[in-house]
Amino acid sequence: MEIREAAAADWDAIWPFMRRIVVAGETFSWERDLDEKRARERWFPAPPWRTVVAVEDGRVLGTAISGPNREGPGAHVATASFMVDPDTGGRGVGRALGRHVLGRAEADGFRAMQFNAVVETNTRAVELWKSLGMEIATTLPEAFHHPTRGYVGLHVMYRRF
């Protein structure tokens, strides 16, 4: 599996699985009826943000974006978001993307990584991020409305470099 900078041409492979994830409403804090134009704008922000894809045999398996969590005095802490094609779950795509993004953020001079909204019921992601050195800094009770589990917490996760 190769992790590389995303190209505009990758969007046609990203959007179908991104749409499934967003419509499901279980792991991402986006409007479930988000249209393609707005999704693309969010996933391909201007520098200093980066968008990467995980590719195997020419197929995009997942994607991530990363950049500064805040502006000005808070710009030394990075943040990131990840989406992995549900059809490729369990193959290490999320782990590969996570390692890449964390390593790139540290190499770029960020002092830490903060994930602002990890849904507490997304236990696979929570355990993955913990295994990569992220810690739960706090949990915001009932900050996410899950479509089948009701109001559940959102973890803020953090790792210093």
Image (tube, helix red, strand yellow):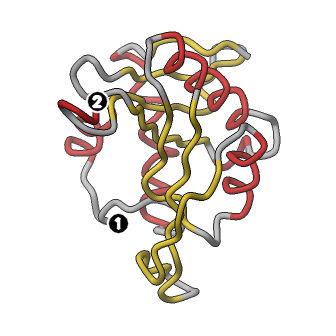
Q: Do the CB atoms of the residues marked 1 and 2 lie less than 8 Å apart? A: no
> Could you tell me which quadrant the C terminus lies in?
top right
The residue under the point 50% across, 56% down is 20
The residue under the point 65% across, 51% down is 135
Residue nearer the viewer, 114 or 8? 114
Report the amino acid beneath label 2. Ala
Residue tagged by mark 1? 32
Residue 148 on image: x %, y %: 56, 86
Of callouts 1 and 2, the N-terminal one: 1
Residue 21 in the image: above or below residue 105: below
The residue under the point 42% across, 37% down is 79
The Cα–Cα distance between marks 1 and 2, rounded to whole angstroms, is 29 Å
- Dot 1 falls on a residue whose secondary structure is loop
- Dot 2 falls on a residue whose secondary structure is loop
> Could you tell me which quadrant the N terminus lies in?
top right
Residue 17 in the image: above or below residue 139: above
Residue 41 on image: x %, y %: 22, 35
Of tags 1 and 2, which is closer to the observer? 2
Residue tagged by mark 2? 75
Q: Give the residue furthest to the bottom.
A: 150
